[in-house]
Image: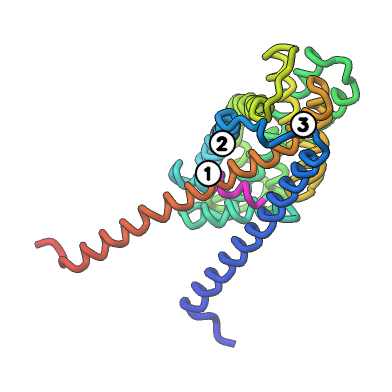
Amino acid sequence: MSPPTPVAKRRLKLVLRFAMLALVAWFVHRAVLSGWQKLEERIAAGEWSISRLRWAWLIGAVTLYSLAQLPCGLFFHQILDRLGQRVSLAATIRAFYIGHLGKYVPGKAMVVVMRSVMLAQAGAHAGLAAVAVFYETLTMMAVGAIMSTIIIAFCYPQHSQWLLGAAAMIGITGLPTFPPVFAQIMKRMKIGRGPTADDGANDDDARANEVARRIHFGTMLRGWALNTIAWIVMGMSIWATVRAAGFASDRGLWAELTVGTVAAALSVVIGFLSFIPGGFGVRDGVLFAVLTWNYDEATAMVTAILVRLVWLVAELLVSVILYKSAAGPGLDELRRRQSSTASGPPP
């Protein structure tokens, strides 16, 4: 059998690309419908009315969640740079944000696939892009677990079971991000060849040492700092969503922000560890449970449903904007090249 022609390869890549986008679109559509149906149930039960919605706060909640992802995207870019992948910041941020939609597809692998494919198109090594996705994601989860443990210990010590659970999750998500452990994982996965090795070493131990040299404790600490900012802003997004729904708490702003941060971190981390697409059910249940530490059950339930919709809308809006913004310059560049070709070579 003759190998496929370049035209056939391009067509196959195009088909696979559209198939991937169609799959993501389908599961995102299901997520929107699920959240909206749950909200309608609460309205029908008389626990909330859409007339209470405050649009300025809602826009604020969407904006805050979108901004919360930026520090994580910056850390993702730093990891790629440490691995020797010279990809522009714009291309990295674009792949990072759009890749979020992959978490709604079963298996969690679509996030890795989408980001790796987009970064490979920007000139990165696909395997090393996948390594960066792996390290960034686990760092985010580890920091979320650490922050939850600290806040619960100092502000909500009565919830001892949640405290123990958060502490356990530090080990599960944080241990693989320690450089020596991470290097051994890369060794076993056979990842870290040529593009990361300056000396051309081929054996697994040499490649593992090279990864350890590039992803060191300084890298990890920068990730912790950036992700701490991300979780705080994500907690602010939940606080803004409570306001958007027309609710408030008489316990003060500090209590609302701390419980919002814990709710954001624990719901996302536990949802991630559940391996359920988008953390459906799990993330919402954890969010509801933690919010009841500061709000009544009706407020917590409506907020949990609205957070699901707010975060999903934020991801969709940013993804569409970044996808379109990347398409525009590409067309301009093509026209420029065509014009330059038509005018002939310079004298």
Which badge, 2 or 1, is on the more N-terminal residue?
A: 2
- Callout 1: 10 Å neighbours few (<14), some, many (20+)? some
Q: Is residue 116 visible?
A: yes
**How far apart, in angstroms, are the residues tagged by discs 3 and 2?**
19 Å
Of helix, strand and loop, which one carries label 1?
Answer: helix
- Depth-wise, is mark 3 or mark 2 nearer the camera? 2
Q: Quadrant of residue 106?
A: bottom right
Pointer 2: what residue?
A: 66
Q: Residue at x 57, y 66 (%)?
A: 18
Magenta residues (range): 95-102
Nearer-N-terminus badge (3/2):
2
Q: Main secondary structure of the magenta part?
A: helix
Q: Residues within 10 Å of mark 3 (few under 14, many from 20)?
A: many
Q: Which label was assigned to residue 239?
A: none
Please name the residue shown 45% across and 41% down the image.
89
Tell me whether the residue at label 2 lies in contact with that at label 1, contact meaning CB atoms closer than 8 angstroms: yes
* Relative height, residue 308 to residue 246 (above, below): below
Instruction: Give above or below for 208 relative to 180.
Output: below
Q: Earlier in the sequence, mark 1 or mark 3?
A: 3
- Which quadrant is home to the C terminus? bottom left
Q: Which mark is residue 266?
A: 3
